[in-house]
Image (tube, rainbow, N blue to C red):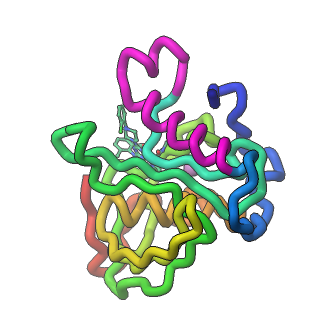
Amino acid sequence: MILMKDIVRDPNPVLRKQSKRVQFPLSKKDQKLAKDMMQYLEVSQDPKLCKRYGLRAGVGLAAPQVNVSELMAAVLVPDDNDDPHHPQFKAVIINPLIIANSVQRGAMTEGEGCLSVDKDIPGLVHRADRITLQYQDMTGKKHIVRLKNYPAIVCQHEIDHLHGTLFYDHINMKDRFAKQGDEVLFS
Ligand SMILES: CNC(=O)c1cccc(C)c1Nc1nc(N2CCN(c3ccccc3Cl)CC2)nc(N2CSC[C@H]2C(=O)NC)n1
Ligand code: NI
């Protein structure tokens, strides 16, 4: 089970490395990693279990955050009314590729948090509002999905981790909450 002690913190250089492609069929190690990362998100989103294991709640976790420089991340974006049975987007995304970005930009009004960044870094994190994401699932099957708003933001945040980018790299430090043109803001 992944616990907070297993999560690498900024400025550990592993968070700035380029991850390597994952080969199929998945090794036993990669299968366990994928399951453990998704389990972390599920446990962290259950208030009782989150408290019991001393976790920080998250909707995304990337392999470099647990010290594995591979192109793999788990994403679990719950449904708005927090219905655990119908998440907005739930997937282990392997060798992900953003194959299209909307011109329209988007950002979360409250900014972003990251399990690997202990301090709060306020500011709008400017991203594409919609993306077309290609990834392989744990069986190696290729998927192409179109995402917008929260799920799109989370996937961009996690895919950034795979290429050594952290969310605050996208904040305009001179004017942290300045909108970029007709950027969509949502909470
Ligand atoms: C500095 N201001 C802020 O952080 C921030 C502040 C307010 C609102 C938002 C929306 C903010 N932003 C933000 N909030 C989240 N959570 C909201 C709470 N939630 C959660 C909490 C409890 C149970 C279940 C769940 Cl679901 C877990 C996820 N997550 C992310 N990110 C950025 S993309 C990856 C994702 C991530 O998992 N980070 C650890 N950003
Ligand atoms: Ni993060």
Q: Please state if 66 lies on the left or on the right of 129 as rendered.
A: right
Counting from the top left corner in percent of width and height, residue 11 is at 77, 46
Q: Please state if 47 lies on the left or on the right of 12 as rendered.
A: left
Residue at image x 30%, y 74%? 183
Q: Please state if 134 lies on the left or on the right of 35 as rendered.
A: left
First to last magenta residue range:
31-55
Give the vertical position of 183 relative to 124 (above or below): below
Quadrant for the N terminus, please: top right
Residue at image x 37%, y 75%? 145
Q: Is residue 171 in view from this perspective?
A: no
Residue at image x 53%, y 34%? 40
Q: Magenta region, mostly helix, strand or loop?
A: helix
Residue placed most toward the observer, 96 or 110:
96
Q: Is residue 115 in view from this perspective?
A: yes
Residue placed most toward the observer, 184 or 50:
50
Give the vertical position of 126 relative to 119 (above or below): below
Residue 26 sits in quarter: bottom right
Give the vertical position of 73 relative to 38 (above or below): below
Q: Is residue 35 magenta?
A: yes
Q: Residue furthest right?
A: 13
Counting from the top left corner in percent of width and height, residue 69 is at 77, 57
Q: Residue furthest top?
A: 52
Residue at image x 39%, y 59%? 177
Give the vertical position of 42 relative to 86 (above or below): above
Q: Is residue 58 magenta?
A: no
Counting from the top left corner in percent of width and height, residue 58 is at 46, 39
